[in-house]
Image (cartoon, rainbow, N blue to C red):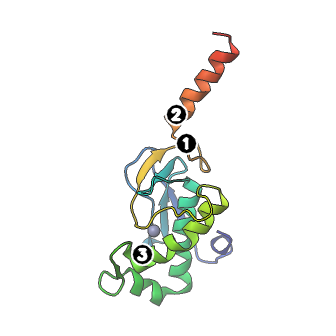
Amino acid sequence: MAYLMNSPVHISVVEMPAGTELGADYVPSAKTIHWSPYNAVKTTNGVVISPATVLDHEADHTQQHLKHPEQFKKDTDPKTGKDKSYGDKEEKRVITGREQKTARKLKEIKPGQVTRKDHKGENIRVSGPTSTTPAAEEEAERLLREKKKAGQ
Ligand SMILES: [Zn+2]
């Protein structure tokens, strides 16, 4: 993120509605990241990565596009970038690289565990950017705590 904040190139982050089924993405032609601070992603490994990790994933695509445009183009090209497991080589680079580092730092995965080995996932609505608990569950827990406090 530091690279992008110091970049002279303007990058837009457009907030998607909470609960959307669309995944976050980076659109190179518009230098725009689509993202929601209320959407975490549940991966095919059953790991939930927070909106913060998702944003960092998109920021890594952005950084690669700005710093190494030729490589980015090659790795996202349907022919030259094709990757069986990850869709394309750019996704493989980000998912096996920064996504793991960030998810580990934020304790979303344990040492030795990986977030996923593909480019798939389902949106989970959460209460904020660093949360990995579904919003409905969080709300139920909060109500339970209040009930206990009130002695009911
Ligand atoms: Zn990606």
Q: Nearer the viewer, residue 102 or 13?
A: 102
Q: Pointer 1 and pointer 2: residues touching (CB < 8 Å)? A: yes
Q: Which residue is mark 2?
A: 137
Q: Is residue 79 left or right of residue 66?
A: left
Q: Is residue 103 left or right of residue 31?
A: right
* Residue furthest front as drawn: 112
On whether ligand 1 comes within 8 Å of the CB at mark 1, the answer is: no
For the N terminus, the quadrant is bottom right
Q: Nearer the viewer, residue 106 or 9?
A: 106
As measured in the structure, the alpha-carbon distance from the residue carrying label 1 to the one carrying label 3 is 34 Å
Q: Which residue is mark 1?
A: 133
Q: Which mark is residue 29?
A: 3
Q: Earlier in the sequence, mark 2 or mark 3?
A: 3
Q: In which quarter of the view is residue 91 placed?
A: bottom left
Residue 55: image x %, image y %?
Answer: 55, 61
Q: Report helix, strand or loop for mark 1.
A: loop
Residue type at numbered disc 2: Glu
For the C terminus, the quadrant is top right
Residue 141: image x %, image y %?
Answer: 58, 28
Q: Report helix, strand or loop for mark 2.
A: helix
Badge 2 crowding class, 10 Å Cα cut-off, few under 14, some 14 to 19, many 20 or more, is few
* Residue furthest left as drawn: 79
Q: Residue at 59% of width from left, 45% of height from top?
A: 128
